[in-house]
Image (cartoon, rainbow, N blue to C red):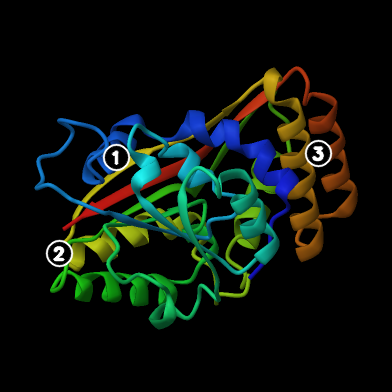
């Protein structure tokens, strides 16, 4: 699978934290017994959270709450360097099991005994085949124990820039097309991922809730905006769908306004419980 640098993950984390839908976030905590009154459930004892595409542990940090140190966190990623960074940051304070695994081999993912499977900004990189296999496995697990899924920050294909530029729509269309390419897990669902995941889980008998979770980026996010603009331009340039001079004009305009402008990037959160 395509990898991400620690630098990019660090840049986006504050925007991710602001974007997460608080209602679904609190419902996920309640399912883990960490947010009294959010959900009614029996005494849980030891709960296991399996975080797919864990990176440096951003989902762990997002779900940090009184009592979360007593959970077992299974962090799963194909990138050993990112897992090592997660262990460096949290290994002394949380009960962590790290698994360097190929996420696409769903049958071998360490889901046994999980109370909640989580992922952040992952499913838009994955294929329909991956989602179908994961949902099928989660549905089969219900026979032994109740397990939910909390998938946050799935890109939905919308971006609105301020100030506007005449080429915004063309660049967005080209970028969204690039999001559908194979990133190592089969043809990616890209902007369709959130809806596809919610539908698959509903069809499998889960109670599914969705909510929007847009990035709201402004002048305080200039470093992230610069990285985002450069990343979009590089992706579009690689697929060759736009004239290079047109794309360079857009990129240069956007970078010139990174410290004074902003954008809204759409995402959707999904919470599915048995």
User: Which quadrant does the C terminus fall into?
Assistant: bottom left
Describe residue 202's horizontal placement relative to residue 165 as left or right: left
Residue 24 seen by the camera:
yes
User: Which quadrant does the N terminus fall into?
Assistant: bottom right
Q: Nearer the viewer, residue 37 or 131?
A: 37
- Graded by Cα atoms within 10 Å as few (under 14), some (14 to 19) or many (20 or more), the crowding at tag 2 reads few
Marks 2, 3: nearer the viewer? 2
* CB atoms of marks 2 and 1 within 8 Å: no
**From mark 3 to mark 1, how far is it between C-alphas?**
42 Å
**From mark 2 to mark 3, how far is it between C-alphas?**
45 Å
* CB atoms of marks 2 and 3 within 8 Å: no
Q: Quadrant of residue 161?
A: top right
Q: Secondary structure at mark 3?
A: helix
Q: Residue 147 placed where, x, y %?
A: 23, 60
Q: Secondary structure at mark 1?
A: helix
Looking at this rendering, what residue extends furthest in the front direction?
A: 92
Look at the picture and state if 27 lies above or below 187: above
Q: Which residue is identified by label 1?
A: 29
**From mark 2 to mark 1, how far is it between C-alphas?**
21 Å
Q: Which residue is identified by label 2?
A: 205
Describe residue 222's horizontal placement relative to residue 156 as left or right: right
Marks 3, 1: nearer the viewer? 1
Q: Which residue is identified by label 3?
A: 250
Going from N to C along the chain, the mark reached first, 2 or 3, is: 2
The residue sitting at 20% across, 51% down in the picture is 45
Q: Nearer the viewer, residue 175 or 92?
A: 92
Q: Nearer the viewer, residue 63 or 198?
A: 63
Going from N to C along the chain, the mark reached first, 2 or 1, is: 1
Residue 162 seen by the camera:
no
Going from N to C along the chain, the mark reached first, 3 or 1, is: 1
């Amino acid at each position: 699978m395509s990898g991400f640098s620690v630098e990019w993950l660090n840049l986006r984390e504050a925007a991710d934290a602001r974007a997460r839908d608080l209602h679904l976030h609190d419902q996920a905590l309640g399912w883990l017994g960490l947010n009294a009154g959010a959900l009614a459930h029996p005494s849980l004892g030891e709960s296991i959270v399996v975080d797919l595409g864990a990176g440096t542990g951003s989902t762990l940090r997002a779900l940090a709450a009184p009592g979360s140190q007593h959970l077992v966190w299974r962090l799963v990623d194909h990138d050993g360097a990112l897992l090592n960074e997660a262990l460096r940051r949290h290994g002394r304070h949380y009960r962590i099991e790290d698994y360097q695994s190929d996420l696409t081999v769903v049958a071998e993912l360490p889901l046994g005994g999980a109370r909640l499977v989580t992922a952040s900004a992952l499913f838009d990189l994955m294929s329909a085949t991956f989602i179908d296999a994961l949902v099928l496995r989660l549905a089969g697990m219900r026979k032994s124990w109740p397990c939910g899924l909390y998938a946050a920050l799935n890109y939905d294909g919308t971006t609105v820039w301020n100030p506007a530029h005449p080429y915004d729509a063309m660049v967005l269309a080209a970028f969204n097309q690039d999001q559908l390419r194979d990133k190592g897990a089969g043809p990616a669902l890209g902007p369709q991922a959130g809806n596809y995941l919610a539908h698959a889980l509903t069809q499998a008998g889960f109670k599914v809730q969705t909510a929007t979770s847009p990035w709201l980026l402004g002048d305080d996010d200039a470093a992230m905006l610069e990285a985002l603009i450069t990343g979009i331009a590089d992706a579009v340039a690689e697929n060759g769908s736009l004239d290079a001079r047109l794309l360079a004009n857009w990129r240069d305009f956007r970078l010139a306004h990174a410290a004074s402008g902003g954008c809204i990037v759409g995402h959707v959160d999904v919470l599915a419980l048995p």
